[in-house]
Image (cartoon, rainbow, N blue to C red):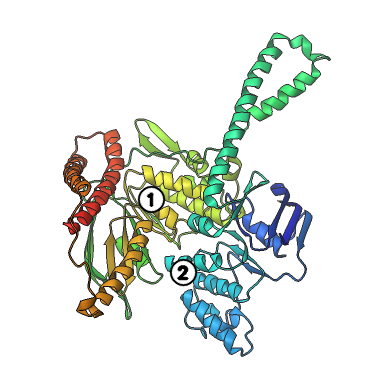
Amino acid sequence: MNAYLDVQGLTKSFGALLLFDNLSFSISEGQHVGLVARNGMGKSTLLSILTGKEGYDSGEIIYRRDLKVGYLEQSPRFDPDETVLDACFNHQGDDEKILRAKQVLTQLKIRDLQQPMGQLSGGQQKRVALANVLLTEPDLLILDEPTNHLDLDMIEWLEGYLSRGNKTLLMVTHDRFFLDRVCDTIIELDDHTLYTYRGNYAYYLEKRQHRIDVARAEIERANNLYRRELEWMRRMPQARGHKAKYREDAFYELERKAKQRIEDRQMRLKSSNVYIGSKIFECQYVSKSWGDQVMLKDFYYNFARFEKMGIVGNNGTGKSTFLKLLLGLEPVDSGRFDIGETVRFGYFSQEGLHFDEQQKVIDVVRDIADYIDLGGGRHFTATQLLQHFQFTPDQQYNYVYKLSGGERRKLYLCTVLMRNPNFLVLDEPTNDLDIQALQILEEYLADFPGCVIVVSHDRYFMDKVVDHLLVFKGNGEIKDFPGNYTQYREWCALRPKEESTAVMADKRPKREYRNTEKRKMTYKEKVEFAQLEKDIAALEEEQKRIEEALCGSTVDIDEITRMSKRLPLLKAELDDKSMRWLELSEIG
């Protein structure tokens, strides 16, 4: 294939910190490449080097002659006085280009083309920068976190846009659905080394696990050899004088290998000392507007114990406003929030990333607490929490100003968790986090024995974490959907078709109707229907027993944890069976 970019032996370091060493890879015409790595491993730096924004120590970067490259930076900068349209490209009065710019910007919810860039939020500026890159129609698109600050509709539009045609892509993104659906090659930067996987994200996960399993097997083999060599050295110390020198050298090499450790990034953090009462909060007919823009209108909701709720909706529909009203950070126009006395909120906000740059990472967390009490005499220290979220002992004693953007987000998350809350309120927690950090956070939330509300545009993350969704549709309209995001989108995809069919049926002449009689259930469906009634009754009884037990005071903490894990699974199974029961009951 025609190579657009060839990288040979690329090395980059910052002082004593080696980011990558002797990296080599190539990108061919039409290839869609996703770059994944942990925060702080040099993903954004690599993109900056490839686009000439930053220098490197050694190696070669070779582009095909006359190749046009478009680059979306993670944090783009603009002249604050230029208009949105001028910031996109020098259109020079070309009506066709202006028309196309309007189309792309409208898809990205940027409608005032004459607005000065200085008046736009950081997220809006990122969207203008994305539009700019797409409009210049480059041969090679290099994108750093293109889905950040996009709502779900925009992400799905961009997903389709990049998947169509023969575009060539190199991108960094934490959005795993996006990686899976857009990319045909994944390159992983791990421990200063680059690994290439010729497939999408699902293929990468499979092959990466195989690589780790092989490495673990090699380390175990080295451990076994190390033990045997250690026995030999203890038995025969005189043999180390001259002739057995090669065995001594081999021994120390084995020792080095045996002490290698592949980080288990799926380690779970369990906090069994979190208690929350039966009363959480009641949103009593709350209304809130900003000028003419209605966010909530007489909204009522009673939040249940151990509930894990996701909030989705387009930008500007009131998601973050709802969280601030709940936390008392914004006043309501009418109505009130009645919050239980045992509730201790932990709030991760989009605006909360503020640190003393000269402080050490460990001191930032210890200023909050030295440890979390896990009950039963067990503690989880600040050091252990940081290590759990991928901060090595060396990094913990680094200064904050040395951290990457993703590492700062992880540190902020650690400061929230260190307060040991029993109700987590997370507003876009996934932005700038690497995939391994997201997996750790997902496991933490799965085990968290309290309440969770998450606002996120990360579809994969929402599917793994939440039990149900509040869908903010705008103008104060809010719907409660009993499922995850993928199920919601599938439901939405069915609705227009059903509604369209109904409209067409109303317009057809009566003589065109055929087979209007309802079909009868088959014998197999009747058996299934009868079994569903029994299953639903049993599940409802189990749900009632668990909820009554959780509201009581005689259940020990381990049993509470077990029940809190069982309850969402039980509800999901009950929803599925109830939905199938309704489908069969429609047949009659």
Query: Residue at position x 50%, y 76% from top?
Result: 120
Query: Residue at position x 56%, y 85% from top?
Result: 98
Q: Locate residue 557: give its quadrant.
A: top left
Other residues around mark 2 within 10 Å, as few (<14) / some (14–19) / many (≥20): some
**Residue 340 visible in this rendered orientation of the protein:** no
Which of marks 2 and 1 precedes in the sequence?
A: 2
Residue reaching furthest to the right: 242
- Residue 10 picture location, percent across and down: 75, 53
- Residue 486 picture location, percent across and down: 38, 57
Q: Quick check: 535 left or right of 290?
A: left
Q: Secondary structure beneath disc 1?
A: helix
Q: Locate residue 374: give its quadrant.
A: top left
Q: Which amino acid is tagged 1?
A: Val
Q: Nearer the viewer, mark 1 or mark 2?
A: 2
Residue identifier under label 2: 154
Residue identifier under label 1: 465
Q: CA distance from mark 1 to mark 2?
A: 22 Å
Query: Residue at position x 74%, y 60% from top?
Result: 55
Q: Quick check: 328 left or right of 409?
A: left
